[in-house]
Amino acid sequence: MFKKRLRSRDTFVYVVMTVPLAILFFFFHTLPAIHGILLSFTDWNGFGPVHFIGLKNYIGLIHDPQVVHAYLFT
């Protein structure tokens, strides 16, 4: 009986300590990362409307000689 009660209390403490951290991690790390990935498929400059351009940004990176040179030496 005592071990079962101790185990449930430990589980409660674990949840109380972990859930707020998981929520903060989601809002301050995961959501901005997803937002950045989604914005990389647009030509938005920070103001005005957002225009979806697909993989055009990534194709431009592949064809840019400075970027290719930097990747080769990194």
Image (cartoon, rainbow, N blue to C red):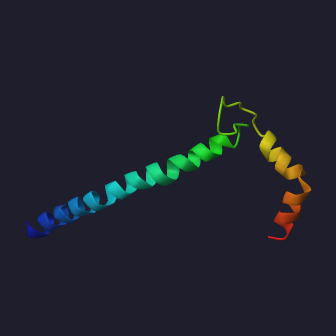
> Which of these two is toward me, 67 or 3?
67
Which residue is situated farthest in the front direction here?
A: 47
Q: Quadrant of residue 18?
A: bottom left
Quarter of the image with the C terminus in it = bottom right
Residue 37 at x, y = what percent?
Answer: 64, 45
Q: Quadrant of residue 7?
A: bottom left
> Which of these two is toward me, 59 or 64?
64
Quarter of the image with the N terminus in it = bottom left
Q: Residue at x 89, y 52 (%)?
A: 64
- In the picture, measured across the screen, residue 44 lies left or right of residue 32, that is right
- In the picture, measured across the screen, residue 40 lies left or right of residue 22, that is right
Q: Residue at x 57, y 50 (%)?
A: 33
Q: Residue at x 82, y 64 (%)?
A: 71
Q: Residue at x 84, y 58 (%)?
A: 67
Tag count in the figure?
A: 0
Q: Quadrant of residue 3?
A: bottom left
Residue 8 at x, y = what percent?
Answer: 18, 61
Residue 20 at x, y = what percent?
Answer: 33, 55
Q: Does residue 12 lie above or below 3 as drawn?
A: above
- In the picture, measured across the screen, residue 38 lies left or right of residue 5, that is right
- In the picture, measured across the screen, residue 21 lies left or right of residue 3, that is right
Residue 66 at x, y = what percent?
Answer: 88, 59
